[in-house]
Amino acid sequence: MKITEQIKQPILAEMELFEKKFHEAMSSKVALLNRITYYIVNRKGKQMRPMFVFLTAKMVSEGIVNERTYRGASVIELIHTATLVHDDVVDDSNRRRGFFSINALWKNKIAVLVGDYLLSKGLLLSIDNGDFDLLKIISVAVREMSEGELLQIEKARRLDITEDVYYEIIRQKTATLIAACCSLGACSVNPENTVVVEKMRKFGELIGMAFQIKDDLFDYTDDAIGKPTGIDIKEQKMTLPLIYVLNHCTPKEKKWVINSIKNHNKDKKRVKEVIAFVKNNNGLSYAEQKMVEFQQEALLLIQDFPDSPYKDALTLMVNYVIERKK
């Protein structure tokens, strides 16, 4: 059994019902919109976000989920899908997970409007049911994701960001959404217990940090299926292995690396040289060590919860995040 299927095992019934509810949450009277949302639903990925919502909810409540949990998972997925549709427009990307992106099939104008539609559907699903606590969690996540993207754009031009700024960028850009899933799961079943809700938010944030560092490491491995080696370098993205090496090499080496990334990022040989330089100067081992620190810190946060299949699945999920091959 694949590890993702193993993680899903304790929440199979919930995930099936969630898919039905999620589909309903997207429906519209406009035929064009329904065609597009149908296309979106059918190219779903690993579904990590709803899995985090349900596993967290069940772990903190000894196996109970309610309608709020389903709504929360649907809202997260609606809003996350909206940001992905908009991202593809922003990045002028024609593909997502091997499928054509919405903007490739229906043009930018329609893609932006579909993203807006999904966002409003998500907000209304919470408002119509009075889930204002859940809506707040999600809205904070959307604000932080936007800030994180803009912070990255602002800092990336300079190519000399510190490790702290990098953590702030990935905390907002990537970790905040997983944090929202986990705090939302806890809040949906136990809104009064703010300590547990905050604990699960932190748990999700730490997993998100580890997840992003793992993504960074893929840029330096030849066996990554997810993205071709060196693509972050070609796109001048600052990743943790690179930041570490830039902060620990001679001024002359630093100048060469920055010049390579800025002016020679299309030169395959030069990109290979940069990758080798990062590897030889402990960039990868440092990033791996940091990733494991975040992972271990996350696992500590859930160790006091009673043993259950949900806790086991979350532990598997945390390990999967840093062991995945794509």
Image: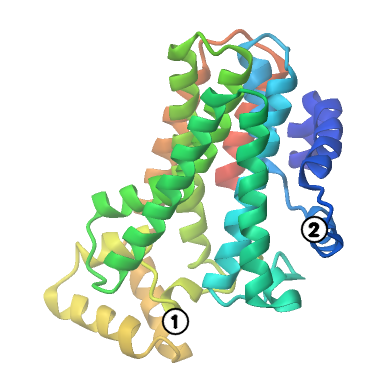
Question: What residue is pinned by disc 1?
Answer: 272
- Separation of residues labelled 1 and 2 (CA atoms): 33 Å
Relative horizontal placement of residue 283, taking residue 254 as reference (left or right): right
Query: What SS does tag 1 mark?
Result: helix
User: Mark 2 is on which residue type?
Assistant: Arg
Instruction: For mark 2, give the secondary structure.
Output: loop
Count neighbours of disc 1 (C-alpha within 10 A) and say few if under 14, some if 14 to 19, many if 20 or more. some
* Residue 296 higher or lower than 157, as above or below: above
Name the residue tied to disc 2: 43
Residue 196 x %, y %: 48, 14
Residue 184 appears in the figure: yes
Q: Describe residue 118's horizontal placement relative to residue 16 as left or right.
A: left
Instruction: Give the label, 1 or 2, closer to the camera.
Output: 2
Where in the figure is residue 42, as x and y percent of width and height?
84, 56
210 in relation to 260, above or below: above
Is 275 placed above or below 146 here? below
Q: Is residue 316 visible?
A: no
As displayed, is residue 303 above or below residue 232?
A: above
* Residue type, label 1: Lys
| Residue visible at 52% across and 71% down in the picture | 90
